[in-house]
Image (cartoon, rainbow, N blue to C red):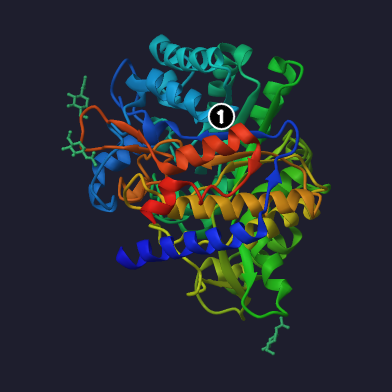
Amino acid sequence: MASYSFLGVTVSFIFIITYAFANDTLHFPKDFLLGTATASYQIEGAWNESGKGESIWDEYTHNRPNFIRDHSTGDVACDSYHKYKEDVQLLSNLKVDFYRFSISWPRVLPTGYANVINREGINYYKNLINELLAKGIEPFVTLYHWDHPEIFEKMGGWTNEMMVEWISDYARVIFKELGPKVKYFITINEAAVFCDEGYGRNDKAPGKNLGSTGKYLCMHNALKAHAKIYHIYDEEFRKPGDKIGIDAACSGAIAKHLNDTTAIDLHFQFHCGWAVHPIFSKTGDYPEVMKTHIAENSRLDGYPRSLLPKFSPTWVNYIKGTSDFFALNHYTSVRVETVPREEGQRWYQFSGVKESLDPSWPGSASSWLKVVPQGFREIINKIAKEYDNPPLYIMENGFSDECCTSDHSRISYLHSYIKAMLLAIYEDGCNVKGYTIWSFLDNFEWLAGYTERFGLVYVNFTDSQRTRTPKLSFNWYKHIIETRKLTSTFDSPTVINVA
Ligand SMILES: *[C@@H]1O[C@H](CO)[C@@H](O)[C@H](O)[C@H]1NC(C)=O
Ligand SMILES: *[C@@H]1O[C@H](CO)[C@@H](O)[C@H](O)[C@H]1NC(C)=O
Ligand SMILES: *[C@@H]1O[C@H](CO)[C@@H](O)[C@H](O)[C@H]1NC(C)=O
């Protein structure tokens, strides 16, 4: 990755020069929240300890090692199940306002069903929450970050509508046990990602590879499940000031041809609108353009009905409005262009939009992650425009590399993206309330195993102690949190010496 490191240094230098001359300083709004995030399967380890049941990611990594780039598993991962006190101490040193983490459903309910509650599992999360609160860090709890019990996958997982009931039962247990000390809940993380990559394709567990039918059915049930969990919370558990919402991954889109604004909108509706229009729009249901395009393409392909399932008016109303905030995960952008329909099943042939990457965009350790900060500002604006400027929490944003604690490229990326977000707030009037760096720790990056590192903290995965070392970006972010303003710290002696 020599060329990549070279690029990182180049980018750093550009920022040093730009900011030395511009003397730019941007403050965060009052009450703006700054935090960092992880997910259970990616950090906890202890996959078979203390009464935990099997998740779809345990099943996938154990039985399909060849699909994981380094043939690794999350059996131990960062061992955060045992090292949570050290983790919270690091979070306290970082001075974050909140910590976003997720609950492992099979750790709490080993049979999957709510008939048996594993006290050791519940106590792990109670201890973690108590430890955070004792250090003044707000827990931001995700109920579902992809690791559902394997038993339900054997019955079709998210393609089975019974998931709506099963996950609601689980949510009720969590609200009852942990709710009293938690103000912020996220129901489901990135439904479009696990539905497309886990059910439509084989790029995430459970790797069902069911094409468009499986993908759309998965989302249909995930939206119903989200709405049901929201109503349960709203009716039975909500305390004054609490917030609960869904999390969506929306990448940015840059038109390949200057005049092609149609491509940008179609890309948005098919990737982001698919998961959020039913919740955040005034009309509810899937975006109109998705319904018509998929119905027409299904007809041309000879299907007796649209591959996109239909919501009844009762479900449309039940789902609409079920989120107190818009949780956005955003990393990168793609270049888009409208193309005519061709034979086949590829997603862009339904949407009519072809995606590509601009070779001039700086890269990361992940093939899909290019550095395009203007795409971040544009997607924040698009969401504000489409859904009447909802309160927006950036719940994931981050950069991958392959090594090292001198992570200048990560600092460059974060600086440019945070700046784009602040411009969306101050110059465009967007209602952004919080920002989260993915990730707190280097961790198990799904099918990339441990080959792509996103952490502010370096984790040594060959060391049985899983030793943690804060990276330069950790100190850089800490400085931002302390000062509540985005200043360039590239003129700090450490950074200049290393560069
Ligand atoms: C748990 O899994 C590990 C492999 O990760 C294995 O060595 C160990 O024996 C298992 N423990 C139990 C109690 O099954
Ligand atoms: C945009 O302009 C290009 C080149 O002039 C043309 O080929 C294309 O059809 C136009 N696209 C749209 C959506 O108008
Ligand atoms: C990681 O830990 C191993 C085993 O303790 C050690 O040999 C190695 O030097 C460590 N690597 C780094 C980068 O600290």
- Near-viewer residue (431 or 247): 431
Q: Classify mark 1: helix, strand or loop.
A: loop
Amino acid type, residue under disc 1 in the picture: Val
Q: Horizontal and vertical percent for residue 449? A: 31, 46
Quarter of image, res 479 = top right
- Near-viewer residue (436 or 182): 436
- Whether residue 317 appears in this view of the structure is yes
- Near-viewer residue (222 or 13): 13
Left or right, 358 with respect to 34, comes to left
Quarter of image, res 459 = top left
Q: Residue at x 29, y 19 (%)?
A: 49
Does residue 467 lie above or below 340 as drawn?
Answer: above
Left or right, 37 with respect to 21, comes to left
- Whether residue 308 appears in this view of the structure is no
- Near-viewer residue (127 or 354): 127
Q: Where's the N terminus, which quadrant?
A: bottom left
Left or right, 52 with respect to 379, comes to left
Left or right, 333 with respect to 107, comes to right
Q: Please give the residue where the numbered disc 1 appears in the rendered image.
A: 96
Does residue 354 lie above or below 149 as drawn?
Answer: below
Q: Which residue is drawn at 43% across and 40% down?
A: 456
Q: Which residue is drawn at 60% across and 57% down?
A: 19
Q: Where's the C terminus, which quadrant?
A: bottom left
**Label 1, residues with CA under 10 Å away: few <14, some 14-19, many ≥20:** many
Q: Horizontal and vertical percent for residue 192? A: 56, 50
Q: How many labels does the image show?
A: 1
Q: Horizontal and vertical percent for residue 333? A: 57, 62
Q: Residue at x 41, y 25 (%)?
A: 87
Q: Horizontal and vertical percent for residue 293? A: 68, 67
Ligand 2 quadrant assignment: bottom right
Does residue 352 lie above or below 17 as drawn?
Answer: below
